[in-house]
Image: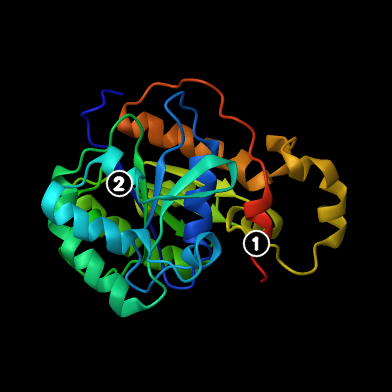
Amino acid sequence: MSPDVRRIVAFGAVTGAPGVTTVVGATSAAWRSGAGRPLVWEADPAGGVLQQVINPGGEAGLVTVAGVARREGLVHGKVLEYAGQLVGGVPVVTAPLHPGQAKAALEELAPLWETAETGPVPWLVDIGRIDPSVPLPHGVWGCGDALVLVTRGDRHALLYGALIARRAAERGLPVVVALVGDCPESDREILRALGTAGVVRLPWDPFTAAVLRGQWAGGLPTRRALLGGRLAGRSRRQDYPLVAAASGLVRQLERLLGTAEAETPAALTAGPLALRGSS
């Protein structure tokens, strides 16, 4: 991709959907690019959680970036200076935990996304829950190049997903549905009902989710012991089903964004950062 091309993918969810931040992280970890991992943004007005893992007590990157961007715009190289790093080398701009602070930062950034310079890799932006009643989306969703709609596969969730997909279609925004967990409907039925550009099925994978968040979830001692030395940096992609499945989402997004496949990504590794969380 040309370094001066803007590519922004918004990741949002219907009410009750699981783990948008986790899906964003898995997608970045699965991306095939010799230029590095796509930059992950926590841009949820309800606040973020990753700052508490990366640098507890420090200022969230989103707040700092908002201040800098007022003067210098949203430029990839400058934004990276204030990004943290998750497992597997995934760069992330963290949001403050407090919703009021997150909303204030996002309000400052809202008019700047349209002219952002994302550089050689896309930006993957977690915008949290999407309200389908909002007729004119703004900020990231208003100027993104694609929307990944994270949802469960029950009929109630898919009904809300159809409303959101309709809003996206009104402005020509292509949508890929990321189904987490079981769903009795076929891909063809979902595509027909929601009118989206693609469907990707992702497994319910608490272990990988905990690793991507930089935490260890309880009740996983057997899996943790099984990986053993791989946690020191010798892990393989097949050890993380969610990341492996997210490769399908990457292929869908590459097609929509017009980006070429490049190198196979480095293995996702769970180093010391992944052990810092206590929950």
Is residue 171 among the parts visible in the rendering?
Answer: no
Helix, strand or loop at mark 1: loop
Q: Earlier in the sequence, mark 1 or mark 2?
A: 2
Image location of residue 224, percent across then percent down: 81, 54
Residue 15 percent location from the top left of the image: 43, 72
Q: Is residue 75 left or right of residue 202?
A: left
103 relative to 251 in the view: left or right: left
The one of 30 and 51 positioned closer to us in this rendering: 51
> In the visual, does 29 lie left or right of 256?
right
- Dot 2 crowding, Cα within 10 Å, few <14, some 14–19, many 20+: many
Q: How is the image coloured?
A: rainbow
**Crowding at mark 1 (Cα within 10 Å: few <14, some 14-19, many 20+):** some
Quarter occupied by the C terminus:
bottom right
| Position of residue 73 measured from the top left corner of the image (x, y, whole percent) | 15, 47
Residue at 35% x, 26% y: name it: 259
Query: At x 51% / y 52%, what residue is drawn?
Result: 23
Q: Amino acid at mark 1?
A: Arg
Which residue is identified by label 2?
79
Kindly identify the amino acid type of the residue bearing the numbered disc 2.
Answer: Val
Residue contact between numbered discs 1 and 2, judged by CB atoms under 8 Å: no
Residue at mark 1 to residue at mark 2: CA–CA distance: 24 Å
Q: Is residue 168 above or below residue 256?
A: below
List the residue tagged with mark 1.
Answer: 276
Instruction: Give the side of residue 186 with respect to residue 223, left or right.
Output: left
Q: Secondary structure at mark 2?
A: helix
Report the front residue among 230 and 175: 230
Q: Is residue 39 above or below residue 95?
A: above
Residue 193, quarter of the rendered image: bottom left
In the rendered image, the vertical position of residue 6 relative to residue 71, given as above or below: above
Residue at 72%, 35% in the rendered image = 236
